[in-house]
Image: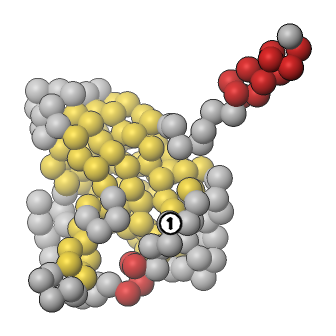
Amino acid sequence: MKPILTLLAALCLAAPVFAHGFTAGDLEIKHPHIPQPAASAKAAGGFMTIVNSGTEPDRLLGIESGIAAKSEVHESKVDASGVGTMTHIDAIEIPAGGTVTLEHGGLHVMFMGLTGTLTEGELYKATLIFERAGRVDVEFSIDAPTGQGGDHDTMDHSSHGTGG
């Protein structure tokens, strides 16, 4: 009986780091994370899922964080010829009753001018700024590298327009 209790206790205490989230009013922010970049990286992408269970849309306007000199809302696209670009955008619309996933190759937050090395397993505080929900404090977990961490260094950053 003792080995079973020990196993159950270990399973209860071994809650995965990736199962974290935050709520603010009608918004649920699921698993804000950054795949661990190389130690020499100057930038990193931040990803999450935002669920809006309300009847009014909201917009993610920006982000503040101490892990980088500058943090922005971005969108990555690849054109028909295979050229990838990353563009700073004004906001990400979170539709009423909808879900938006910030992920590689699409909408994301960008941390530029990293102030230190980001180590897998650590948590870093940030503040998401929404039009309706206001300032929402979250923690980004540093997850295992995805093998795509270098894509931000090879994309064309010259297209810093506005959008969304």
Q: Is residue 146 above or below residue 31?
A: below
Q: Is residue 54 above or below residue 115?
A: above
Give the x, y percent position of residue 14.
Answer: 69, 33
Residue lying farthest to the top in this orientation: 1
Left or right, residue 104 beside residue 21: left
Give the x, y percent position of residue 45.
Answer: 41, 66
Residue labelled with disc 1: 146
Q: Is residue 19 visible?
A: yes
As helix, strand or loop, the secondary structure at mark 1 comes to: loop
Which quadrant of the structure image shows residue 88? Answer: bottom left
Q: Is residue 13 above or below residue 111?
A: above
- Which image quadrant: the N terminus? top right
Give the x, y percent position of residue 31.
Answer: 45, 44
Left or right, residue 108 beside residue 88: right
Q: Is residue 133 visible?
A: no
Which quadrant of the structure image shows residue 71? Answer: bottom left
Q: Residue at x 39, y 78 (%)?
A: 152
Q: Residue at x 11, y 66 (%)?
A: 163
Q: Report the front residue among 66 and 14.
A: 14
